[in-house]
Amino acid sequence: MTDPNQKLRPLPAFIFMTRWLQLPLYLGLILAQCVYVFHFWVELKDLIGAAMGNDAALQHIFQAVAVPGAPVPEKLNETTIMLVVLGLIDVVMISNLLVMVIIGGYETFISRMNLDHHPDQPEWLSHVNASVLKTKLAMAIIGISSIHLLKTFINANAYTEKTLVAQTVIHVVFLLSAMAIAYTDRITTMTHNESKHH
């Protein structure tokens, strides 16, 4: 039986310690998260300003939702508001993706956070591993892809049929990839459970 207090030999200890090289990458993603938070509030402030009749905010909103080759909207209508809100949802979903990568990646590849008894521990973190993280990320990417596809369909007149088909095919590929990842994870889990029972 292996002694849990047994120290690693110098070379394995050094190699294991190199996992901390990933720490600056996760800190960088936290800074990227800050940029997304700032971007969200700028867009939200402009949307509220445009709804209140602020001309500068209104022009910024029109430029933000404008599609190359399509006429720029002239007034704040339901479609324009919907496009801005979809943009905000997109930012939130990407932010969720960042949280999963930062927290899940740190927990999986660097060090335990010991959040077992923390009241705010995310449900998915209690059983996180590389496989679970991969499935969660795939689902988040599908959500982001769905938002982009919806925005494209709302502005369908501004896109060629080829572009619409290409975006739809890419989204379907994301869906199939996520299903394949989830199926592979299920088979792996079942095989692992069977091997433990035998």
Image (cartoon, helix red, strand yellow):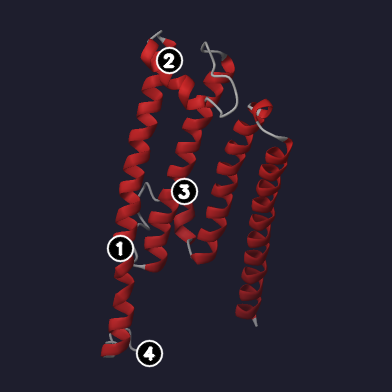
Q: Secondary structure at mark 1?
A: helix
Query: Badge 2: few (under 14), some or many (20 or more) residues near its Cα, within 10 Å?
Result: many
Q: Tell me if 190 is positioned left or right of 23 in this view.
A: right
- Which-is-in-front pick, marks 3 and 4? 3
Mark 1 vs mark 4, CA separation in Å: 29 Å
Query: Badge 3: few (under 14), some or many (20 or more) residues near its Cα, within 10 Å?
Result: some
Mark 4: amino acid = Thr
Is residue 97 depicted above or below 54 in this figure?
Answer: below
Mark 1 vs mark 3, CA separation in Å: 18 Å
Q: How many marks?
A: 4
**Which label is found at residue 58?**
2
Mark 1: amino acid = Leu
Q: Earlier in the sequence, mark 2 or mark 4?
A: 4
Q: Earlier in the sequence, mark 2 or mark 3?
A: 2
Query: Badge 1: few (under 14), some or many (20 or more) residues near its Cα, within 10 Å?
Result: some
Q: Position of residue 195 (x, y in %)?
A: 63, 80
**Which label is found at residue 23?**
1
- Report the quarter where the N terminus lies: bottom left
Q: Residue drawn at (30%, 63%), measured in percent from left and top? A: 23
Q: Residue drawn at (70%, 43%), measured in percent from left and top? A: 168
**Foreground of the two, 63 or 20:** 63
Q: Is residue 47 visible?
A: no
Q: Residue tagged by mark 4?
A: 2
Q: Residue tagged by mark 3?
A: 97
**Foreground of the two, 126 or 94:** 94
Query: Contact (CB < 8 A) between labels 2 and 3?
Result: no
Q: Secondary structure at mark 4?
A: loop
Q: Secondary structure at mark 3?
A: helix
Q: Earlier in the sequence, mark 1 or mark 3?
A: 1
